[in-house]
Amino acid sequence: MPTVQVLVAVIHAWLHLPLVLGVMGSPPKNLPPCLNGGTQNISGERYGCTCVLPEMDRQCKLTRVTVGGAPTELLYGPLSVTLNRTHSFRIGLQYITNDPTGNGTLLSVRNASKQAQISFFLIAGRPGFSISLNRYALTMQFNGTVAVTNDNAWHHLDLILEAD
C-alpha cells in the first residue's frame, strides 16, 4: 500500500508549525520506531523523532505515517502575509512517498472561503506548487529533467516569496 509522509516547517511567518507532525487517534499507541538511535517525542496527538545529531534528518526519521485514501485535513490558515524588500515568507516542506503514480497534494493552505492559497503537489512524481494571494497567482512544476520523487526517499522543497 502506498504511504506518504510529510514534514512541515514554516519560517519567517506569523504561523509556526512543528517540524514533524503525525495525525493519529488519541492517545497514540504502537508508534513506529525512530532509526539510528533517535528517540520518540510524544505530545498529545503528535509524535516525532529527535535525532542524536541534527544532520541525521534522513537517517533518523519517522519511519511510518500512512495517509491512504482521502486527504488528511490539517487546518493552517488563512494566511496574512506582508511582503516588502526587507520581509520575505518561506515555507519548507519535507516529504517521502512510495505512491506508484506519484500524483497528489502534499500540503494546502486555504483561505476562509476554502480556496487554496498555497498548494504543494506531485504530478508523475515531480513536485510543483500553486500560489494565490490577493491578485497574484502562479503555478509552477518541475519538468522531466528533474528526477521523480516518489522513490521512498526524503525530499525537501522551499518556497520563498520576496517583494520585487
Image (spheres, helix red, strand yellow):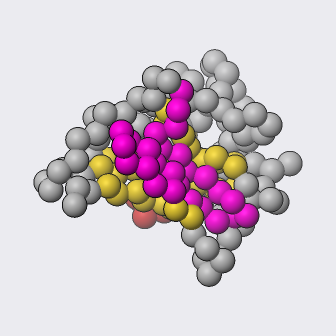
Is residue 33 something that shows in the picture? yes
The C terminus appears in which quarter of the rendering? bottom left
Q: Residue at x 36, y 43 (%)?
A: 135
> In the visual, does 66 lie left or right of 128?
right
Q: Percent x, y for residue 127? A: 59, 61
**The one of 4 and 121 positioned closer to us in this rendering:** 121
What's the residue at 32%, 55% (across, down)? 161
The location of residue 30, given as percent across then percent down, is 72, 32
Determine the image quadrant of residue 74.
top right
From the viewer's perspective, is 48 left or right of 2? left
Vertical placement of residue 147 versus 158, above or below = below
The residue furthest left is 86
Picture residue at 51% right of the left edge, 51% below the top: 130
Q: Quadrant of residue 149?
A: bottom right
Could you say which is closer to the camera, residue 76 or residue 154? 76
Viewer-nearest residue: 135 or 163: 135
Give me the residue at 69% from left, 35% from top. 71
Is 57 placed left or right of 89 in the picture?
Answer: right
| Span highlighted in magenta in the image | 114-139
Tally the marks. 0
Magenta stretch encompasses residue 13:
no
Q: Is residue 34 shown above or below 154? A: above
Name of the residue lying farthest toward the bottom: 145
Q: What x and y, as percent, mark residue 80?
A: 31, 33
Percent of width and height locating residue 94: 52, 55
Residue lying farthest right? 1
Residue positioned most to the front: 135
Asked if residue 127 is among those painted magenta in the image, a careful observer would answer yes
Secondary structure mainly formed by the magenta segment: strand
Residue nearest the observer in this picture, 89 or 140: 140
* Image position of 148 with respect to 119: above or below: below
Asked if one can make out residue 152 in the rendered structure from this viewpoint, the answer is no
